[in-house]
Amino acid sequence: MSGVVITVDGRPVETSADLTILETCREEGLDIPTLCFLENLTPANTCRICVVEIGGSRALVPACSRRVESGMQIKTESERVRHTRMMVLELLGSSVDLSLTPLVDQLMDRYGAAPDRFDGGATVEEAPTIDNQLFVRDYAKCILCYKCVQACGVDAQNTFAISVVGRGFEARIATEYQLALPDSACVFCGNCFGVCPTGALIPTTEYEMRAAGTWDEDAQTVTRTICPYCGVGCNLDLVVQDNRILKALSPLDHDVTSGHLCIKGRFGWQHVQSE
Amino acid sequence: MEDTDLIVLWGSNAREAHPIFFHHILKAIHSGARMYAIDPRRTTSTQWADMWLGLDVGSDIALANAVGREIIAAGLQNQTFIDRATVGFEAYRQSVEQWTLDRAEAVTGVPAEAIRALAHEYAKAGRAQLCWTLGITEHHNATDNVLALINLALLTGHVGRYGSGLVPIRGQNNVQGGGDMGALPNKLPGFQDVENDKARERFEAAWAATLNPVKGWHLSQMFEAMARGELRALYVIGENPAQSEADTNHTVELLRGLDFMVVQDIYLTKTAELANVVLPAAAGWVESEGTVTSSERRVQRVRKALDPPGQARDDIDILSDLARRMGHHWATPTAEQAWDELRSLSPIHAGMSYPRLEELGGLQWPCRDEDDPGELFLHGRLWHDPPGGPPAPFTPVEDSPPLDVLSEEYPIRLTTGRRLDSFNTGVQSGGYESPIRRGETIDLSPEDGAALAVAEGERVLVSSRRGAVRAPVRFDPSLRPGLAFMTLHFPDEVETNRLTNDAWDPKSGTAEFKATAIRIDRLDT
Amino acid sequence: MDLRLMTAEPTAAERDAVDKVLGEPDSGWVGGLRRAVDGHAAVGGRSIRERRHQLLPALHAVQSSAGWISQGALNYICRRLTVPPAEAYGVVTFYAMLSTTPRPPRVAHVCDDVSCAVAGAGGLKAALERKLGPAGLGTGEVTWIRSPCLGMCDQAPAVFLQLAGGHDWAIGSAEPDSVVSGLVGQTPAFETGDSSDLHVSSGGPLLARVGKESPSDLGDYRAAGGYSALARAFDMGPQAVIDEITLSGLTGRGGAAFPTGRKWQAVADAAGPRYVVANGDESEPGTFKDRVLMEEDPFAVIEAMAIAGWAVGAEKGYLYIRGEYPLATQRLGDAIEQARVYGLLGGNVLGRGVAFDIELRRGAGAYICGEETALFNSIEGYRGEPRSKPPYPTERGLFGQPTLVNNIETLANVLPIINGGGQAFAATGTPGSTGTKLFCLSGSVNRPGVYEVAFGATLGQLLDMAGGVRPGRRLQAILVGGAAGSFVEPDSLDVPATFEGLGAIGASLGSGAVVVFDDTVEMPSIVGRIAEFFRDESCGQCVPCRVGTVRQEEALHRLIEGPPDGQVGLLNEIAAVMRDGSICGLGQTAATAVQSAVALGLVGGAT
């Protein structure tokens, strides 16, 4: 864990060689945007919005996965960086529905992105998949960040019920042969929607309330408690509105769950509000 | 767990019963750890193992003793550790001497080569975690089963070190906390012995009351006392014995025979339906403040996210009010005040203030003062030279097969367990719709299904020496011929515990849920 | 791993096809019969998960037996290899040669990429549509579909026949009748694959044996001096071999031109086990030199891999060959077998106590798998998506181990370096580009083929070697380096086709593809085909490439068809994000050719 000195936007910064550029920059208070990154998952570095410019490197490099090296010269907001981020936002904004992606409007403003420049181009058209009672898959909102695949796979659940299938612009998240989730290996832990950054994977309760216009984040509280089932001690963050639990999340930084839950913790709270 | 080299998962289907604990096992596996799984069924957990040992139900001690013998015969025991930190090795060695691999194979059904491999890998591993759950403890000789495993850890020194230890995994979110708080017949809070005068005096001083110096009955003893007519009144808090106990028919009969029963629960359970008084309670984990203790002795805060429905009240409220009706002028303390009183009386919890629990995301006892970070693992003292405190004893234990023996009339061994999306008697887990729930079935090996000429989905009569239930058949290739499986999640559909044996372990009071002799009969339709 | 499989069962034929590749299942838990002992013990975990790398070979077996991958077949493969079905499905759907829906068992993949387009692929497709119906829609035994470059540009138009139940076959100079008879008739035996179509010109050692020695006879190869280099390498010792490669100045011929000696040294210096991977996934449009080497001089490839293994300390090599190269696959497989028999591969190579063996792995239709880390994923049984670098293959490559990955042509250069010395090699060519180079001339030239020249020859000289454009035609443009390369105009004919020469005019040598277009060629459709190629071949992993290649094609289309206003600017912006932001070389170069075409006014009029 040796200390290294790098240069960030012209300023020398002391950091540790086991940190990524993103971690170092965040410690320095720099706001590098991310979409496909999440602290509890292996960086997939697919969205490319976190790229920064490094002296001596032809292409830009993803801050989320690249480790710092001694002497690195990093520019976090150069013209090339800003252009790439703007274009990533435009490419995504023009092809998928980002309406439930938190803070995306601020990002669009920050980088001057105007996705409508590509109006008329191909989009990810897909009707929401509703094949179970617990959550909805609305892939028209999917930016293919790979997080759900990772959470279902080797980073957490190790169930591997979903994969990226197909190739290129036609690539989608799906089960084998597009089977309905209840016919697939899915165990309904919900860790996929726990990590989804765009609302493409969304609990049915939230989906229906949003459709009905009753989803009101200002009226919601989040309370941390412990799952009532087995003895592992998983932390639950319960989202409550009008004295009703709407969904259960889990803190990313707690070393018991690392943000992940099982089906009982994720959905097993309905017994306290049965009528 | 993540940093261990070898995981031995014995009588635990953690993949389904403790899924997030299993995430930690998976992290270890992905970092290179190997795993052995011992379970009669080829469960989803065992499918992650490098080797699965599918022993016959109830032959755990035979297997463990053979592992111990093989370790000793191969000279792989940690003699330095044994000499310094344990006592009774020689007696143990003699007790396992007869448990050759061949004999163990004959008794357990597990190929000798697999037993040998387990013995050698466990002994040679740099770090090894030996984990178990109800597959070990829901037997008539539960305590002996546990001792057999402890013997192996002592033999190899896989205890009291980082990444090496004994890991019983708890089935409920606060069963450990119940023990912490003295909800044991022989303990005061903080595991202080009720028959220890000094300990009792401290509580008596704090509470200004006299405490009964004689230890009480555990659950199985209570039911026996009911049967003898000695126990006439019962106050049940958050338990559903009418469905969760083995031999349901007998249990309900005993509960009905009581003079008076109070049930305090968040639900009108089957037990509550039998009660004289029902006290509706707030759900501890979401409608009130407090703490729970997890399997790893980690005390964590539960918080109120919802107002309880209707007349339901916080447990502290109910108990304080009850005390007042009995003439004791208890103020109704806040959860934190009650906890602080506990901290003042239980040294192992003393350092766990609410602010610290909040800040650190929980603390593992013992945590003796507010500078104490808590203990990641116990028994580290055994590695001190000399070990601080008494040496750890080997306890020779003998194989004792299930009491419900197989016979021509009851030729199939039924074992019970959990499924991923359900929990115990389904009181809580029945509240949500699960796409993967398929209701209760009698799971049979495809071979047995064919031999019995039953079809998948066909309802059959499942009978034991105690009772009978009807259930649809499901073929499960994870079962071998002669082995059947049911859960107790859907007692309203299929009361599995009508079949199970309430013969219990005299040391722990646990009933033998895991081993029932049954027969399957086709229903004439 | 706890799998939840589908309910479908394989047919007996599907099961047999899989078992033929994987062997009989060794327990009831992995697809065999349930034995009594299976009820009491099972081996599993890592030892089973480690079989995953056999996924693609098993899928190939089913595809070429049944013509598609059914749920039952995939289920069986998943059970055999402990692969989750969703992941396996993700892998199947990654490859163009594998189908997850029933389709006619005999499929003609008709190349309409840049070189074949020049040679009349359009007419061929129209004729096939008349004879067989629309692309992909055949309902009977045969159908045809469009294909990207098949690496047979010297015999354009080319067609690859995927023939379930038989073996795959490729036909050059295809005509409607030859395609149809190839589909319905008897597949020719591999032995009949002769070299009569070969257009090669050897100006150096790489093609010296091509067309002269039998590619199927190890005896011939040895008589012609084969295996002298390996023996010599054993005498020299590993470090001396690496030093010689370094001294030669050899750089990678796959496109990136990385110094080969430095790569070998890095792998040798890393802690083992190590692997050698030969990249025979030649898929760059306009490129076919590696195919010729593999078809015509397979023992040289094997010998060079053995030398590489010896030098870097690897005992295992993988040769990853493009799925659409049936003849090369057959000849390499045969050559590997012969080499094993004669002790030139195996546990005791040349009787010198050195272990080295080679496994031949067949791709399944994905340009991206030529990218080295995508190739590793493909071998390992995952989707052929590139990995993030660093770590580089020399540190963590195949199976996470230090890996030497070299292009086929690069490896072929090892033999003359060891035989003749690095110094002599470095004396050939130019200071910045040592040795000889294989150039693939195709398109509007009289004699398309592979031409070996010492570095230094100009584009004009290469064009002359291939006989120039046809009489009465005028040279319009040249695509140098394939789809990932650049267009240049006739005024660049004096530019030396070297790394430095082409670099100086903003182009790059790339794979050595030189596709020539005369004045009859409609350049907008050629440029459009390149944009389409990248859209089709993007793996889809990163946003700049996945969406950028689509937006590039759309903007290009508007530029050509109108309204063209602002499209050049948009194309430039898309090009910038793909170049700067993509994970791998595919996305980073996906705009290069289009950009050069726009700059030269080959599309959208003069600018």
Image (cartoon, coloured by chain):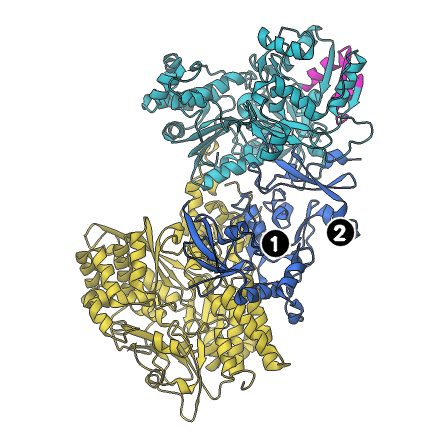
Chain colours: A blue, B cyan, C yellow
Residue C45 percent location from the top left of the image: 45, 39
Q: Amino acid at mark 2?
A: Arg
Q: Residue at x 17, y 57 (%)?
A: C235
Labels in figure, total: 2
For label 2, the residue is A210
Q: How far apart in space, not on screen, are marks 2 and 1 (Cα)?
A: 26 Å
- Confirm whether the magenta stretch covers residue B265: yes
Above or below, comparing residue A162 to residue A123 in the picture: above
Q: Answer yes or no: is residue B516 visible.
A: yes
Q: Amino acid at mark 1?
A: Gln
Q: Secondary structure at mark 2?
A: helix
Q: Secondary structure at mark 1?
A: helix
Q: Residues within 10 Å of mark 2 (few under 14, many from 20)?
A: few
* Image mark for residue B384: none
State which quadrant residue C424 falls in.
bottom left
Q: Residue at x 30, y 64 (%)?
A: C411
Farthest-out residue, left = C235
The earlier-in-sequence mark between 2 and 1 is 1
Between residues B110 and B18, which one lies in front from this camera angle? B18
Q: Quadrant of the C terminus of chain A?
A: top right
Farthest-out residue, right = B310
Q: Is C590 left or right of B288, judged from the image as shown?
A: left
For label 1, the residue is A178
Between residues B42 and A68, which one lies in front from this camera angle? A68
Above or below, comparing residue A30 to residue A260 in the picture: below
The chain containing the residue under callout 2 comes to: A
Residue C440 percent location from the top left of the image: 37, 76
Q: Which residues are magenta?
A: B248-277
Above or below, comparing residue A145 to residue B256 in the picture: below
Q: Residue at x 32, y 69 (%)?
A: C293
